[in-house]
Image: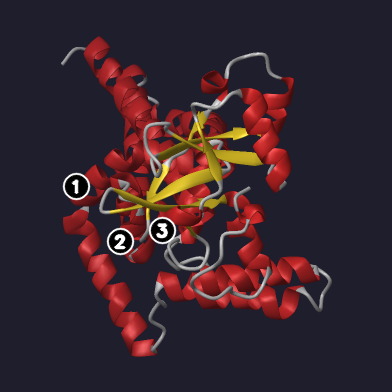
Amino acid sequence: MTNSGTILTAVVLFLLGVRLSAFFSGSETGFYRVSFLRLSIDANAGDPIAKRLLWFARNPSYFVATTLVGTNVANYLTTFAIGLAVVTLFPAEAGWIEITATLAIAPIIFLSAELLPKNLYYRAPLHFLRRDTAWLTFFYYLFLAISLPLIGITKLIERWQGTQQPKLELLLGRSRLVQVLSHGHPAGLLTSSQARLLHGLLHTAAQPVGQATMIAAENISGVSDGLSVDEVLAFAAENGLSRVAVRRAESVDDWYGQVGVIELAIGTQPLSAMIRPMPHVDASESKLNVLRILRSAGNEMCIVTEAERIVGFVSERSLVEEWFTAPRPIGISASPENVV
């Protein structure tokens, strides 16, 4: 190989080593920064990327071993590339020049392969981890033969010392939230309302939305889309509603949208143009995930279905209110104020 070819190889190996170092350094920071609760919610909703990341979260020794091996491979590539370039360019004085070159390039490597990626992954861990999940899985299988002995030794030491890692769900559900509840309020970190909210999240967030919160379809107080704006405003004023559920005129139970009273009062468009479609959720969906769906859709109400049949609907306000108050009994009555 000619000198130019060798130098080109060294440059490619150096850039590859720096990129791998940035990838593994950033991934490690993002892994410990990401919200495992958010991953759990997305995974339960069927997100394949979240499922893979959640698997790593539940098996942290595999992730740590992969990043450890990857970081060492990246460091070896960068040092080998520097040595190869120096030996090719300065064969007679390669020793001290290689040391000098390594010291001169070290700050560049630190900034581009350590400091910058760690800061980026720290600020947006979920974004970068989701983007890099495929590469992370690839390197996991690529380094598996090397990382398995490390994982085995780690598990052997844990078993010998009796310090096996707790389950992720137990860690999130008990250790962190219970610690906040028990120590946050006396220390002045939590107000009484925040403590009530956390208690409500612990006790009811995982329940199906069809329990207590849902308003049955036959009890929904709303209008058909065949009415005029003035008629809908009169209905809202009579029932004290700020938002009105809307069904199709040709059906008595085909609810599909909602409209705000303020939009009706100040708008100049017909009723059909101001109706906002409501997202559909299954009755078995958890209340916390339903709230996330509502926030993502930018909507205050959603339709609850069971076997593709509309069985009721739920509002964002009713979900939040339930977490601030004691759980309501199953079979809630549908008064007009429950509709908004």
Residue under pointer 1: 142
Residue at (54, 29) in percent of width and height? 108
How far apart are labels 2 and 3 at the CA level? 18 Å
Identify the mark nearer the N-term, 3 or 1: 3
The label number, if any, that marks residue 72 in the structure image: none
Please tell me which residue lies in front, 160 or 328. Answer: 328
How far apart are labels 3 and 1 at the CA level? 26 Å
Q: Is residue 101 depicted above or below 330 in this figure?
A: above
Residue 275, percent from left and from top? 53, 27
Residue 299, percent from left and from top? 55, 38
Q: Amino acid at mark 1?
A: Leu
Please tell me which residue lies in front, 59 or 235. Answer: 235
Say which quarter of the image contains residue 74.
top left
Residue under pointer 3: 40
Residue at (67, 14) in percent of width and height? 268
The label number, if any, that marks residue 62 in the structure image: 2
Q: Is residue 57 depicted above or below 223 in this figure?
A: below
Q: Amino acid at mark 2?
A: Tyr
Residue at (30, 20) in percent of width and height? 88
